Structure formats: structure tokens, C-alpha cells
């Protein structure tokens, strides 16, 4: 339930349904932290000429991927250390 809610918010703020420029300034700033925003701007620029920054979107996506992998590795190591992995397998 929470994942679907978060997905809906990300789609609204990233400009999936309409351009980011129509959002309030606070939400525009938040949208700049979402890689999907840059990919959608690039996609729109193919059909409607305008500025885009696909490189920044790719950089953000890469940074989020590295951070996610680091958090995953940390959580697996912590689960092994505390024995959670063994308790779940029984």
C-alpha cells in the first residue's frame, strides 16, 4: 500500500502527467531530486523542442543505484551478524 502511494507521488511530482513548470516552487525543487524528471524532459524534447538535461538524470540514477546497493549490502551483513537470516530460514 505504501509503495503504491509513494509511486503515485513520484509520478505526480516528476512531471509524468504534466510539465514540472506548472508545479509550485517547492515541488519543483523536490522534482529535481527524482531522476525520472530528467528522463521525461528528454523524452518530451524529442517531440517538442526544448531544454533537457539527460546527463544529470543519469548521474542521479547512478548515485541512487550505488547508494541502494550499499544499503542492501549493509542490511544483509547486519542480518547475518544478528542471526535474522538463520531465524527466517527455519
Image: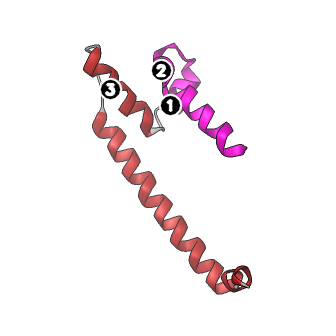
Q: Residue furthest front?
A: 90
Reading the image, the residue beneath label 1 is 31
Image: 38 above or below 25:
below
Image: 88 above or below 35:
below
Where is residue 68 shown, x and y percent of the image?
50, 59
What residue do we see at 60% from left, 72% from top? 75
Nearer-N-terminus badge (2/3): 2
* Dot 1 and dot 2 residues touching (CB under 8 Å): yes
Q: In the rendered view, does 80 fall on the left or right side of 70? A: right
Q: Residues within 10 Å of mark 1 (few under 14, many from 20)?
A: many
The magenta segment: 1-30
Q: Residues within 10 Å of mark 2 (few under 14, many from 20)?
A: many
**Nearer to me, 34 or 85:** 85
* Dot 2 and dot 3 residues touching (CB under 8 Å): no
What residue do we see at 58% from left, 75% from top? 76
Nearer-N-terminus badge (1/3): 1
Q: Magenta span: helix, strand or loop, mainly?
A: helix
- Quadrant of the image containing the N terminus: top right
Image: 48 above or below 74:
above
**Nearer to me, 26 or 76:** 76
- Quadrant of the image containing the C terminus: bottom right
Q: Nearer the viewer, mark 2 or mark 3?
A: 3
Q: In the rendered view, does 43 fall on the left or right side of 86? A: left
Among the 4 quarters of the image, the one containing residue 46: top left
* Dot 1 and dot 3 residues touching (CB under 8 Å): no
Q: Which mark is on residue 20?
A: 2
Reading the image, the residue beneath label 3 is 43
Amino acid at each position: 500500500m505504501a509503495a503504491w502511494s509513494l509511486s503515485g507521488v513520484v509520478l505526480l511530482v516528476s512531471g509524468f502527467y504534466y510539465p514540472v513548470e506548472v508545479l509550485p516552487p517547492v515541488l519543483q525543487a523536490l522534482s529535481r531530486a527524482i531522476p525520472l524528471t530528467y528522463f521525461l524532459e528528454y523524452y518530451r524534447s524529442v517531440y517538442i523542442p526544448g531544454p533537457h538535461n539527460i546527463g544529470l538524470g543519469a548521474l542521479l540514477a547512478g548515485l541512487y543505484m550505488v547508494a541502494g546497493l550499499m544499503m542492501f549490502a549493509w542490511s544483509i551483513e547486519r542480518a547475518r551478524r544478528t542471526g535474522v537470516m538463520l531465524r527466517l530460514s527455519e
